[in-house]
Image: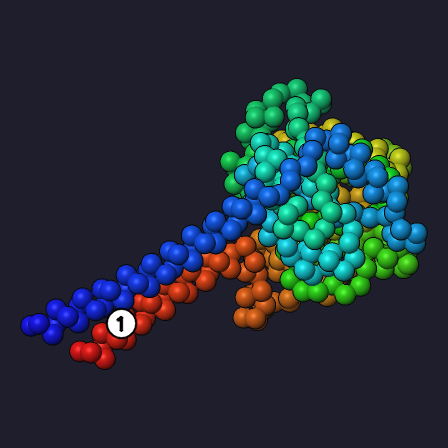
Amino acid sequence: MLNTLLLRRSRSRSFLLITALVICILTVTLIVRTQMRQKSVLRDFRNDQQLKEFQRVVSTWPNGKPKAVIYFLTYEASFWRMKVAVRHLDTYFNQNFQYPVVVFYEGNVTDRDLTDLTDISTSRIFFQKIHFNQPYYLNVSVEEAVKDITCPKPDRSRFPGYNHMSRFHARLVAQQPILANITWYFRLDDDSLLQDYITYDIFRFMQDNHYTYGYNLVFFDNPLCLTYLKENITHYLKVNSIEPKEYSDWPDGGIFYNNFEVSRFDFWRRPDVVRFLKFIDESGGIYHYRWGDAPIKSAAVLIFLPRQQLYHFRKIKYYHGPWYPGFGETITLFEAIKWISVGSLSTCLVLVILLCCYLYLRIRNKIIS
């Protein structure tokens, strides 16, 4: 009886010691991170100040280097993803090529959030806060306009914010003052994660080979998300006597999955392209039917660009939502492991330690018994 009590007491002490050790490690980590946060200097994140800082960078741009940026659009509830996306961007591309990153954001993102993002990145990051307003052409409120959407994605709770963001990508981004003197852009979403090293300058590659639009994946959109889009496009082409370059031969519903997109801004600022995008935007389908920016921009590319100016980045691996472009139909365990972000490693370590403690006690109990 005495031996049993001693064994139980010994196991309890072992578990308490291990638990205390884990708590100590977590406490020290928290203290160090807190001190690092306090030492970081808050920048002036007002739009006009960020614009001035960016313009200074542009004014000293290296000769011969393509004038390009990498841009993101995010919002308050999703801003936490940016740390993961930027880490992947730095690791697999930008630590070698050092192109500026422009983050457009909407909502109550704090200066501390913006500072934390710049602190963990090796890239120069600039910010622009945007405000989504009622589009001038809607005769009802945006909340009323999105009520009858039949498209099953995304979750309806994301309307009308999702619609605003689609409109921004489709038409408004090329009009942003901070991008006025930029030739090239690489667009990623806050959940677009590069997964393997890009060993060459994608902007120089596009420029040297006279490409205008680069994509990574083509897929077919849900017809319920394209209601009346084709009819509007066909009407515009007929009324304006436009003979499309590739659009007529393109399968219905096929779109460039443009959460990975490399392109020239001067294409999106061409008068004929601007007029087309304006017509599609003012048709109201972005809000009434949930037309996404992908089908709209895909149509513009296929109407106004010959196939020779399109490039398929088929070998670049990245992750977005349920899609794994660049991996083919299957992925290896090693590739899946690489999706774990640096920011989640501490959590994983703690879970591993606790699991090891649990297994140790279970095995020890069996040996004793």
Q: Nearer the viewer, residue 333 or 125?
A: 125
Q: Amino acid at mark 1?
A: Arg
Q: Quadrant of the C terminus?
A: bottom left
Q: Residue at x 67, y 60 (%)?
A: 91
Describe residue 96's horizontal placement relative to residue 26 as left or right.
right
Q: Is residue 344 above or below residue 142?
A: below
User: Where residue 202 sits: x, y (%)?
Assistant: 80, 58
Describe residue 153's horizontal placement relative to residue 10 as left or right.
right
Q: Is residue 197 visible?
A: yes
Q: Secondary structure at mark 1?
A: helix
User: Where residue 336 sits: x, y (%)?
Assistant: 55, 65
Q: Nearer the viewer, residue 30 or 355?
A: 30
Q: Nearer the viewer, residue 279 or 85?
A: 85
Q: Is residue 229 visible?
A: no
Q: Residue at x 48, y 54 (%)?
A: 29
Q: Quadrant of residue 278?
A: top right
Q: Residue at x 68, y 55 (%)?
A: 89
User: Where residue 132 sits: x, y (%)?
Assistant: 66, 28
**Farthest left residue in view:** 1
Q: Give the residue number, with chain letter if any, for mark 1.
A: 362
